[in-house]
Amino acid sequence: MAANQAQQTGTDKFERYSRQMILPGWGREGQSRLSEKSVTVVGCGALGSHVASHLARAGVGRLILADRDFVEYSNLPRQALYSEADAAAGLPKAVAAAQRLRQLNSQVEIEPHVVDVNPDTIEDLIAGADLVMDGADNFEVRYLVNEACVKHRIPWVYGGVLGTYGLTAAILPGETPCLYCLLGPMPPPGSVPTCETAGVLGPAVATIAALETVEGLKLLLDRRDALLKSLVVVDIWAGDFERIQTQRSQTRCPVCDDGRYELLDAERGSLTAVLCGRNAVQIHPWPAQVLDLAVLARRLEGTGPITANDYLLRFEVEGCQLTLFPDGRAIVKGTGDPIRARALYARYVGV
Ligand SMILES: [Zn+2]
Protein backbone atom coordinates (compact mmCIF):
# COMPACT_ATOMS: atom_id res chain seq x y z
CA MET A 1 0.00 0.00 0.00
CA ALA A 2 2.89 2.37 0.75
CA ALA A 3 4.13 2.29 -2.87
CA ASN A 4 0.63 2.78 -4.18
CA GLN A 5 0.14 5.66 -1.77
CA ALA A 6 3.38 7.32 -2.85
CA GLN A 7 2.32 7.04 -6.50
CA GLN A 8 -0.97 8.72 -5.79
CA THR A 9 0.43 11.47 -3.66
CA GLY A 10 3.91 12.07 -5.08
CA THR A 11 6.49 12.85 -2.43
CA ASP A 12 4.13 15.12 -0.52
CA LYS A 13 1.43 13.23 1.29
CA PHE A 14 -0.49 16.45 1.81
CA GLU A 15 -0.58 17.38 -1.87
CA ARG A 16 -4.07 16.02 -2.35
CA TYR A 17 -5.37 18.38 0.36
CA SER A 18 -4.13 21.55 -1.38
CA ARG A 19 -7.64 22.97 -1.97
CA GLN A 20 -8.60 22.78 1.66
CA MET A 21 -5.19 23.83 3.00
CA ILE A 22 -5.53 27.21 1.26
CA LEU A 23 -8.68 27.91 3.24
CA PRO A 24 -8.18 30.60 5.89
CA GLY A 25 -6.87 29.19 9.16
CA TRP A 26 -6.13 25.71 7.75
CA GLY A 27 -2.70 25.47 6.10
CA ARG A 28 -0.18 22.63 6.35
CA GLU A 29 -0.21 23.03 10.09
CA GLY A 30 -3.95 22.39 10.24
CA GLN A 31 -3.67 19.45 7.86
CA SER A 32 -0.87 17.98 9.92
CA ARG A 33 -2.95 18.39 13.08
CA LEU A 34 -5.90 16.70 11.37
CA SER A 35 -3.72 13.77 10.31
CA GLU A 36 -2.91 13.07 13.97
CA LYS A 37 -6.52 13.05 15.17
CA SER A 38 -8.70 10.08 15.93
CA VAL A 39 -12.48 10.15 15.50
CA THR A 40 -15.15 7.63 16.49
CA VAL A 41 -18.25 7.55 14.29
CA VAL A 42 -21.15 5.99 16.20
CA GLY A 43 -23.47 4.40 13.64
CA CYS A 44 -22.69 4.02 9.94
CA GLY A 45 -26.17 4.47 8.49
CA ALA A 46 -27.24 7.57 6.61
CA LEU A 47 -25.65 10.28 8.77
CA GLY A 48 -22.61 8.20 9.74
CA SER A 49 -21.98 7.28 6.11
CA HIS A 50 -21.78 10.91 5.00
CA VAL A 51 -19.83 12.03 8.07
CA ALA A 52 -17.24 9.25 7.74
CA SER A 53 -16.84 9.97 4.03
CA HIS A 54 -16.24 13.70 4.66
CA LEU A 55 -13.72 12.99 7.43
CA ALA A 56 -11.81 10.35 5.46
CA ARG A 57 -11.58 12.58 2.39
CA ALA A 58 -10.46 15.50 4.58
CA GLY A 59 -7.58 13.36 5.89
CA VAL A 60 -8.16 12.63 9.59
CA GLY A 61 -5.59 10.23 11.02
CA ARG A 62 -7.83 7.46 12.28
CA LEU A 63 -11.50 6.60 12.00
CA ILE A 64 -13.16 4.16 14.38
CA LEU A 65 -16.44 2.97 12.87
CA ALA A 66 -19.12 1.31 14.99
CA ASP A 67 -22.29 -0.21 13.59
CA ARG A 68 -24.40 -3.25 14.46
CA ASP A 69 -26.26 -3.64 11.18
CA PHE A 70 -25.72 -5.00 7.66
CA VAL A 71 -26.29 -3.34 4.28
CA GLU A 72 -29.71 -3.70 2.63
CA TYR A 73 -31.05 -2.37 -0.66
CA SER A 74 -33.42 -0.03 1.23
CA ASN A 75 -30.34 1.77 2.64
CA LEU A 76 -29.02 2.80 -0.76
CA PRO A 77 -31.12 5.96 -1.33
CA ARG A 78 -29.42 7.65 1.66
CA GLN A 79 -26.39 5.74 2.85
CA ALA A 80 -23.67 7.12 0.67
CA LEU A 81 -20.90 4.59 1.30
CA TYR A 82 -22.74 1.47 0.11
CA SER A 83 -23.38 -0.25 -3.20
CA GLU A 84 -25.75 -2.91 -4.52
CA ALA A 85 -22.84 -5.37 -4.31
CA ASP A 86 -22.54 -4.69 -0.55
CA ALA A 87 -26.27 -5.35 -0.11
CA ALA A 88 -26.12 -8.53 -2.21
CA ALA A 89 -23.18 -9.79 -0.13
CA GLY A 90 -24.97 -8.87 3.11
CA LEU A 91 -21.85 -7.16 4.41
CA PRO A 92 -21.94 -5.52 7.82
CA LYS A 93 -22.06 -1.73 7.38
CA ALA A 94 -18.87 -1.16 9.37
CA VAL A 95 -16.97 -3.60 7.13
CA ALA A 96 -18.42 -2.26 3.85
CA ALA A 97 -17.79 1.32 5.04
CA ALA A 98 -14.16 0.51 5.90
CA GLN A 99 -13.60 -1.04 2.44
CA ARG A 100 -15.03 2.02 0.66
CA LEU A 101 -13.22 4.56 2.86
CA ARG A 102 -9.87 2.82 2.27
CA GLN A 103 -10.49 3.21 -1.45
CA LEU A 104 -11.22 6.92 -0.94
CA ASN A 105 -8.16 7.64 1.18
CA SER A 106 -5.52 5.03 1.95
CA GLN A 107 -3.73 7.48 4.25
CA VAL A 108 -6.45 7.13 6.87
CA GLU A 109 -6.31 4.31 9.39
CA ILE A 110 -9.78 2.75 9.43
CA GLU A 111 -10.92 0.55 12.28
CA PRO A 112 -14.33 -1.10 11.77
CA HIS A 113 -16.29 -2.60 14.67
CA VAL A 114 -19.36 -4.73 13.96
CA VAL A 115 -20.87 -4.11 17.34
CA ASP A 116 -23.94 -2.92 19.18
CA VAL A 117 -23.24 0.45 20.81
CA ASN A 118 -24.39 -0.10 24.37
CA PRO A 119 -23.14 0.46 27.94
CA ASP A 120 -20.68 -2.43 27.56
CA THR A 121 -19.06 -1.24 24.36
CA ILE A 122 -19.26 2.55 24.24
CA GLU A 123 -16.34 3.37 26.53
CA ASP A 124 -13.92 1.15 24.58
CA LEU A 125 -15.13 2.61 21.28
CA ILE A 126 -14.43 6.20 22.33
CA ALA A 127 -11.23 5.53 24.32
CA GLY A 128 -8.43 7.66 22.89
CA ALA A 129 -10.73 9.49 20.45
CA ASP A 130 -10.31 13.24 20.03
CA LEU A 131 -13.88 13.55 18.81
CA VAL A 132 -17.05 11.48 18.61
CA MET A 133 -19.52 11.97 15.74
CA ASP A 134 -23.17 11.03 16.01
CA GLY A 135 -24.46 8.72 13.29
CA ALA A 136 -26.98 6.99 15.57
CA ASP A 137 -30.60 6.44 14.62
CA ASN A 138 -32.14 6.49 18.09
CA PHE A 139 -32.18 8.59 21.24
CA GLU A 140 -31.05 5.82 23.57
CA VAL A 141 -27.68 5.57 21.83
CA ARG A 142 -27.34 9.37 21.63
CA TYR A 143 -28.00 9.83 25.35
CA LEU A 144 -25.55 7.02 26.08
CA VAL A 145 -22.90 8.69 23.89
CA ASN A 146 -23.62 11.95 25.72
CA GLU A 147 -23.02 10.35 29.12
CA ALA A 148 -19.84 8.60 27.99
CA CYS A 149 -18.44 11.74 26.36
CA VAL A 150 -19.24 13.94 29.37
CA LYS A 151 -17.68 11.34 31.69
CA HIS A 152 -14.48 11.14 29.62
CA ARG A 153 -14.46 14.84 28.60
CA ILE A 154 -14.47 14.06 24.87
CA PRO A 155 -16.13 16.59 22.53
CA TRP A 156 -18.90 15.18 20.35
CA VAL A 157 -21.23 16.45 17.67
CA TYR A 158 -24.89 15.54 17.85
CA GLY A 159 -26.90 15.14 14.65
CA GLY A 160 -30.40 13.88 13.95
CA VAL A 161 -32.64 13.82 10.88
CA LEU A 162 -36.32 13.03 10.46
CA GLY A 163 -38.42 13.61 7.37
CA THR A 164 -37.10 16.77 5.74
CA TYR A 165 -35.59 18.42 8.79
CA GLY A 166 -32.70 17.87 11.14
CA LEU A 167 -30.75 19.22 14.10
CA THR A 168 -27.11 19.41 15.00
CA ALA A 169 -25.00 20.84 17.82
CA ALA A 170 -21.41 20.48 18.97
CA ILE A 171 -21.10 19.48 22.61
CA LEU A 172 -17.95 20.26 24.59
CA PRO A 173 -18.16 18.69 28.03
CA GLY A 174 -17.58 21.27 30.75
CA GLU A 175 -17.93 24.18 28.33
CA THR A 176 -21.24 23.92 26.49
CA PRO A 177 -24.61 22.42 27.40
CA CYS A 178 -24.72 18.64 26.96
CA LEU A 179 -27.48 16.82 25.08
CA TYR A 180 -29.47 16.41 28.30
CA CYS A 181 -29.15 20.16 29.00
CA LEU A 182 -30.38 20.91 25.47
CA LEU A 183 -33.20 18.42 25.04
CA GLY A 184 -34.12 17.40 28.59
CA PRO A 185 -34.65 13.79 29.68
CA MET A 186 -34.55 11.07 27.05
CA PRO A 187 -37.95 10.75 25.37
CA PRO A 188 -39.59 7.42 26.22
CA PRO A 189 -39.53 4.86 23.39
CA GLY A 190 -42.51 5.27 21.08
CA SER A 191 -43.17 8.89 22.13
CA VAL A 192 -41.42 10.54 19.18
CA PRO A 193 -41.90 9.97 15.46
CA THR A 194 -39.28 7.79 13.80
CA CYS A 195 -38.08 7.46 10.22
CA GLU A 196 -40.52 4.54 10.03
CA THR A 197 -43.50 6.87 10.48
CA ALA A 198 -42.14 10.15 9.13
CA GLY A 199 -39.78 8.92 6.41
CA VAL A 200 -36.43 10.54 5.69
CA LEU A 201 -35.16 12.63 2.79
CA GLY A 202 -31.63 11.77 1.57
CA PRO A 203 -30.51 15.38 0.97
CA ALA A 204 -31.71 16.34 4.48
CA VAL A 205 -29.28 13.76 5.82
CA ALA A 206 -26.49 15.08 3.60
CA THR A 207 -27.14 18.63 4.83
CA ILE A 208 -27.08 17.77 8.52
CA ALA A 209 -24.03 15.53 8.00
CA ALA A 210 -22.21 18.45 6.34
CA LEU A 211 -23.09 20.85 9.15
CA GLU A 212 -22.13 18.22 11.73
CA THR A 213 -18.79 17.57 10.01
CA VAL A 214 -17.90 21.26 9.80
CA GLU A 215 -18.25 21.63 13.58
CA GLY A 216 -16.22 18.45 13.98
CA LEU A 217 -13.46 19.78 11.72
CA LYS A 218 -13.31 23.02 13.72
CA LEU A 219 -12.74 20.94 16.85
CA LEU A 220 -10.08 18.77 15.17
CA LEU A 221 -8.29 21.83 13.79
CA ASP A 222 -8.35 23.46 17.25
CA ARG A 223 -10.49 26.28 15.90
CA ARG A 224 -12.90 26.46 18.84
CA ASP A 225 -13.23 30.20 18.26
CA ALA A 226 -15.16 29.41 15.07
CA LEU A 227 -17.68 26.99 16.64
CA LEU A 228 -21.30 28.05 16.17
CA LYS A 229 -22.16 27.29 19.81
CA SER A 230 -25.71 26.84 18.58
CA LEU A 231 -28.34 24.24 18.01
CA VAL A 232 -28.81 24.41 14.25
CA VAL A 233 -32.26 23.43 13.00
CA VAL A 234 -32.84 23.00 9.28
CA ASP A 235 -35.86 22.06 7.19
CA ILE A 236 -34.46 21.74 3.70
CA TRP A 237 -37.85 21.21 2.03
CA ALA A 238 -39.32 24.38 3.55
CA GLY A 239 -36.00 26.22 3.25
CA ASP A 240 -35.94 27.11 6.96
CA PHE A 241 -32.58 27.53 8.66
CA GLU A 242 -32.41 28.51 12.31
CA ARG A 243 -29.60 28.91 14.82
CA ILE A 244 -30.53 28.78 18.46
CA GLN A 245 -27.76 29.99 20.75
CA THR A 246 -27.00 27.29 23.30
CA GLN A 247 -26.46 28.27 26.89
CA ARG A 248 -26.28 26.32 30.09
CA SER A 249 -29.70 26.66 31.71
CA GLN A 250 -30.09 27.42 35.38
CA THR A 251 -31.55 23.99 35.95
CA ARG A 252 -29.11 21.42 37.30
CA CYS A 253 -28.18 18.77 34.78
CA PRO A 254 -27.87 15.24 36.20
CA VAL A 255 -25.17 14.40 33.62
CA CYS A 256 -22.99 17.55 33.56
CA ASP A 257 -23.50 18.79 37.11
CA ASP A 258 -23.99 15.63 39.12
CA GLY A 259 -22.04 13.05 37.09
CA ARG A 260 -25.03 10.69 37.14
CA TYR A 261 -24.70 8.35 34.19
CA GLU A 262 -27.96 6.44 34.35
CA LEU A 263 -27.65 4.68 30.99
CA LEU A 264 -23.94 3.96 31.27
CA ASP A 265 -24.26 2.56 34.79
CA ALA A 266 -27.60 0.78 34.32
CA GLU A 267 -28.01 -2.81 35.49
CA ARG A 268 -27.22 -5.00 32.51
CA GLY A 269 -29.72 -7.40 31.10
CA SER A 270 -30.45 -8.95 27.75
CA LEU A 271 -31.10 -6.15 25.32
CA THR A 272 -33.85 -6.16 22.75
CA ALA A 273 -34.25 -3.25 20.37
CA VAL A 274 -36.83 -2.64 17.67
CA LEU A 275 -34.86 -1.28 14.70
CA CYS A 276 -36.04 1.98 13.20
CA GLY A 277 -37.88 1.58 9.90
CA ARG A 278 -36.95 -2.05 9.46
CA ASN A 279 -39.77 -4.30 10.74
CA ALA A 280 -36.91 -5.94 12.60
CA VAL A 281 -35.75 -6.57 16.14
CA GLN A 282 -32.22 -6.91 17.46
CA ILE A 283 -31.58 -9.46 20.20
CA HIS A 284 -28.43 -9.01 22.24
CA PRO A 285 -28.09 -11.66 24.93
CA TRP A 286 -26.49 -10.93 28.28
CA PRO A 287 -24.03 -12.05 29.44
CA ALA A 288 -22.32 -11.62 26.07
CA GLN A 289 -21.38 -14.84 24.31
CA VAL A 290 -19.42 -15.98 21.33
CA LEU A 291 -21.33 -17.87 18.64
CA ASP A 292 -19.46 -20.39 16.51
CA LEU A 293 -21.20 -19.64 13.22
CA ALA A 294 -19.76 -22.68 11.44
CA VAL A 295 -21.15 -25.05 14.11
CA LEU A 296 -24.51 -23.28 14.01
CA ALA A 297 -24.62 -23.48 10.21
CA ARG A 298 -24.24 -27.26 10.41
CA ARG A 299 -26.94 -27.51 13.07
CA LEU A 300 -29.36 -25.41 11.01
CA GLU A 301 -28.85 -27.35 7.79
CA GLY A 302 -32.35 -28.85 7.83
CA THR A 303 -34.13 -25.50 8.12
CA GLY A 304 -33.62 -24.36 4.53
CA PRO A 305 -31.17 -22.19 2.63
CA ILE A 306 -28.39 -20.69 4.72
CA THR A 307 -26.15 -17.87 3.57
CA ALA A 308 -22.94 -16.93 5.31
CA ASN A 309 -19.92 -14.70 4.91
CA ASP A 310 -16.93 -13.98 7.14
CA TYR A 311 -19.04 -11.79 9.40
CA LEU A 312 -22.53 -13.26 9.68
CA LEU A 313 -24.86 -16.21 9.14
CA ARG A 314 -28.38 -15.84 7.72
CA PHE A 315 -31.36 -18.20 7.49
CA GLU A 316 -35.12 -18.04 7.20
CA VAL A 317 -37.61 -19.70 9.49
CA GLU A 318 -41.31 -19.25 10.19
CA GLY A 319 -41.62 -16.24 7.89
CA CYS A 320 -38.72 -14.36 9.50
CA GLN A 321 -35.10 -13.91 8.48
CA LEU A 322 -32.51 -14.32 11.24
CA THR A 323 -29.03 -12.85 10.85
CA LEU A 324 -26.53 -13.98 13.48
CA PHE A 325 -23.24 -12.32 14.39
CA PRO A 326 -20.26 -13.90 16.19
CA ASP A 327 -20.85 -11.68 19.26
CA GLY A 328 -24.12 -13.50 19.92
CA ARG A 329 -26.38 -10.84 18.44
CA ALA A 330 -29.21 -11.55 16.06
CA ILE A 331 -31.27 -9.28 13.85
CA VAL A 332 -34.69 -10.82 13.33
CA LYS A 333 -36.38 -9.38 10.27
CA GLY A 334 -40.04 -9.79 9.47
CA THR A 335 -41.42 -8.87 12.87
CA GLY A 336 -41.55 -5.76 15.04
CA ASP A 337 -42.57 -7.85 18.04
CA PRO A 338 -39.68 -8.36 20.50
CA ILE A 339 -41.40 -11.35 22.15
CA ARG A 340 -41.73 -13.23 18.87
CA ALA A 341 -38.15 -12.35 17.94
CA ARG A 342 -36.83 -13.63 21.27
CA ALA A 343 -38.85 -16.82 20.88
CA LEU A 344 -37.34 -17.48 17.44
CA TYR A 345 -33.86 -16.79 18.80
CA ALA A 346 -34.39 -19.21 21.68
CA ARG A 347 -35.81 -21.89 19.38
CA TYR A 348 -33.16 -21.81 16.63
CA VAL A 349 -30.06 -20.43 18.28
CA GLY A 350 -30.89 -21.97 21.60
CA VAL A 351 -29.00 -19.76 24.03
ZN1 LIG B 1 -25.86 18.58 30.80
Image (cartoon, grey):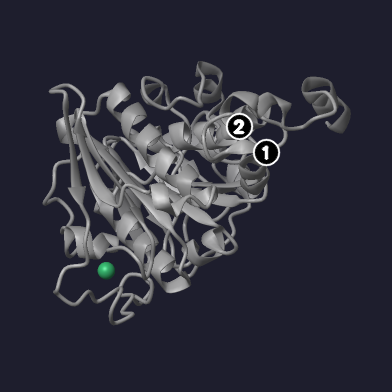
- Relative to residue 32, is residue 186 depicted above or below? below
Q: Residues within 10 Å of mark 2 (few under 14, many from 20)?
A: some
In percent of width and height, residue 159 lies at 32, 44
Q: Tell me if label 1 and label 2 are in contact, CB under 8 Å.
A: yes
Give the numbered dot on residue 205.
Answer: none
Which residue corresponds to the image point at 72% horizontal and 36% vertical from the top-left?
107
The secondary element bearing badge 2 is classed as helix
Q: Is residue 325 left or right of residue 170?
A: right
The answer to whether one can see residue 321 in this image is no
In the image: residue 129, left or right of residue 135: right
**Residue 286 visible in this rendered orientation of the protein:** yes
Instruction: Please tell me whether mark 1 sits on a helix, a strand or a loop.
Output: helix
- Residue type beneath disc 1: Arg
Using the rendered view, name the quadrant where residue 102 is placed: top right
Give the distance between the C-alpha atoms of the residues marked 1 and 2, in whole angstroms.
6 Å
Q: Which residue is mark 1?
A: 28
Q: Report the amino acid beneath label 2.
A: Met
Q: Is residue 231 left or right of residue 226?
A: left
In this rendered view, identify the residue nearer to me: 249 or 56: 249
- What residue is drawn where x is 49% and y is 31%? 304
Q: Position of residue 163 (x, y in %)?
A: 19, 30
* Residue that carries the numbered disc 2 in the rendered image: 21
At 11% across and 51% down in the image, what residue appears? 191
* Residue 176 quadrant: bottom left
The front one of 258 and 144 is: 258
The outermost residue toward the right is: 3
The quadrant holding residue 60 is top right
Q: Residue furthest bottom?
A: 258
Q: Residue at x 25, y 49 (%)?
A: 230
Q: Position of residue 256 (x, y in %)?
A: 30, 74
Q: Quadrant of the N terminus?
A: top right
* Mark 1 surroundings within 10 Å by alpha-carbon count, few (fewer than 14), some (14 through 19), many (20 or more): some
